[in-house]
């Protein structure tokens, strides 16, 4: 179902929503792809992969992690989805980890298979702000970088500003350290500043 190239985000999304590349490669996915409609968002948020709630609803950031993320950003749901085009490193619920602790981390092969969709999205959307959320998304965009050294900083990727955030799932004790919470505050201040720039430019 993949074309060799795309000229519009709507045709890309139509194909992405029926993608079964990982299943055909033998991976046990537990949902269909999760995508959100494009409504002109100028910022792009990249998570790891959908959770069970998102997989069932086929809409990103619907569960507890999404609520925490919106609290960090100081945004209500409508504002959040109108501001951010929501994508993830892989787009189907990967199921529970064998250990029973949390969800399965997508394998490098699944990440590679799904990178196709992200690369075309970024080419078509040319977002001005990109927010990778969690270690896996940060690594895919910026290369391997410990959370403590990149959260609170800004990067550039082409014409976009990149502002990393940790994953808000609560599974990591990283969030409990007051120094790390201060880093999240710095990161969200950067995000608000960049979003404020959009409003100034649009007026
Ligand atoms: S995770 Fe990505 S590449 Fe794999 S089946 Fe889902 S949409 Fe397709």
Image (cartoon, grey):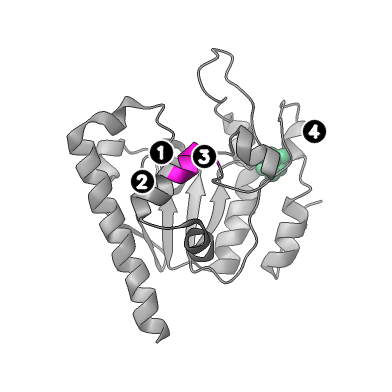
Q: CA distance from mark 4 to mark 2?
A: 32 Å
x then y, percent, for residue 39? 61, 69
- Determine which quarter of the picture holds residue 96: top right
Q: Which of the numbered marks, if any, corresponds to residue 67? A: none
Q: Which of the numbered marks, if any, corresponds to residue 165? A: 2
| Image depth: mark 1 or mark 2 in front | 1
Q: Element under label 4?
A: helix
Q: CA distance from mark 3 to mark 1?
A: 11 Å
Residue at figure coordinates x 70%, y 44% from the top left: 33
| Front one among 17 and 170 | 170
x then y, percent, for residue 141? 44, 48
Residue pointed to by mark 3? 48
Q: CA distance from mark 1 to mark 4?
A: 31 Å
Q: Is residue 98 visible?
A: yes
x then y, percent, for residue 175? 30, 33
- Callout 3: few (<14), some (14-19), or many (20+) C-alpha neighbours within 10 Å? many
Mark 4 or mark 2, which has the lower sequence index? Answer: 4
Q: Which residues are magenta?
A: 63-67
Q: Which of the numbered marks, if any, corresponds to residue 168? A: 1
Q: Is residue 192 magenta?
A: no
Residue pointed to by mark 4? 24
- Callout 1: few (<14), some (14-19), or many (20+) C-alpha neighbours within 10 Å? some
Q: Element under label 2?
A: loop
Mark 1 or mark 4, which has the lower sequence index? Answer: 4
């Amino acid at each position: 179902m993949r074309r060799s190239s795309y000229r519009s985000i709507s045709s890309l999304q139509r194909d992405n929503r029926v993608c079964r590349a990982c299943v055909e490669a033998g991976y046990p996915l537990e949902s269909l792809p999760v995508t959100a409609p494009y409504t002109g968002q100028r910022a792009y948020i990249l998570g790891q992969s959908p959770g069970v709630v998102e997989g069932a609803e086929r809409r990103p950031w619907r569960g507890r992690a999404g609520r925490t993320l919106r609290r960090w950003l100081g945004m209500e749901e409508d504002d959040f989805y109108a501001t951010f085009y929501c994508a993830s490193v892989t787009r189907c619920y990967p199921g529970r980890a064998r250990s029973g602790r949390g969800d399965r981390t997508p394998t490098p092969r699944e990440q590679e298979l799904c990178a196709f969709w992200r690369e075309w999205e970024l080419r078509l959307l040319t977002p001005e702000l990109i927010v990778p959320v969690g270690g896996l998304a940060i690594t895919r965009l910026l290369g391997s970088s410990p959370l403590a050294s990149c959260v609170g900083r800004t990067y550039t990727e082409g014409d976009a500003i990149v502002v990393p955030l940790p994953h808000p799932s609560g599974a990591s004790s990283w969030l409990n350290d007051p120094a790390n919470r201060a880093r999240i505050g710095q990161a969200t201040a950067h995000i608000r500043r960049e979003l404020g720039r959009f409003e100034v430019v649009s007026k």
